[in-house]
Image: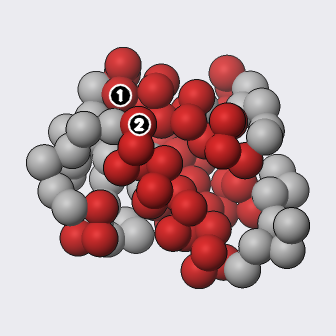
Amino acid sequence: MGTKPADLNRAVREVLAERVVVTVDPDEISDDDLLVEDLGLDSEALLSLVIGLEDRFEVEIPDGDISMANLGTVSRMVGYLSRVGVS
């Protein structure tokens, strides 16, 4: 696929916009906005987001990897996806 980091970042934002209802325009979300604290996502929204990431990037995110450390911000999601081989 050869996705550039900027393209991966945009794709993560698109999944966020498609799967989760947030009160902020996706283009207004900074890379470091915390999904729970800053955007108000609950556990159901986070699960929907994980499913969306798995579908979009054709990866399986193990339950043990579903954490704020890996998926708590756009930049963390991009980093995580890069580490698991989404490129």
Residue at image coords 72%, 47%: 57
Query: Residue under circle 1?
Result: 45
Q: CA distance from mark 1 to mark 2?
A: 8 Å
The C terminus: image quadrant: bottom right
The percent position of residue 4, horizontal first and vertical second, equals: 72, 80
Instruction: Answer above or below: position of 28 versus 44.
Output: below
Question: Viewed as shown, does residue 71 lie left or right of 36?
Answer: right
Of residues 9 and 68, which is closer to you in this image?
9
Q: Secondary structure at mark 1?
A: helix
Q: Nearer the viewer, residue 43 or 68?
A: 43
What's the residue type where badge 1 is placed?
Answer: Ala
Q: Mark 2 or mark 1, which is nearer the start of the sequence?
A: 2
**Figure check: 47 above or below 71:** above
Q: Identify the secondary structure beneath mark 2.
A: helix
**Residues packed near mark 1 inside 10 Å, few (<14), some (14 to 19) or many (20 plus):** some
* Residue at 79% over, 39% down: 59
Residue 28 in sight: yes
Q: Quadrant of residue 41?
A: top left
Tell me residue 58's x, y (percent): 78, 40
- Check if mark 1's residue and mark 2's residue have beta carbons within 8 Å: yes
Q: What's the residue type where badge 2 is placed?
A: Arg
The residue at 62%/75% (across/down) is 7
Q: Indicate which disc residue 19 carries.
A: 2
Give the mark toward the camera: 1 or 2.
Answer: 2
Near mark 2 (Cα within 10 A), the count class, few <14, some 14-19 or many ≥20, is: some
Q: Residue at x 21, y 44 (%)?
A: 22
> Residue 60 location in percent, x, y?
77, 31
| Left or right side of 8 for 20 | left
The image position of residue 56, as x and y in percent, is 66, 44
Quarter of the picture holding the N terminus = bottom right
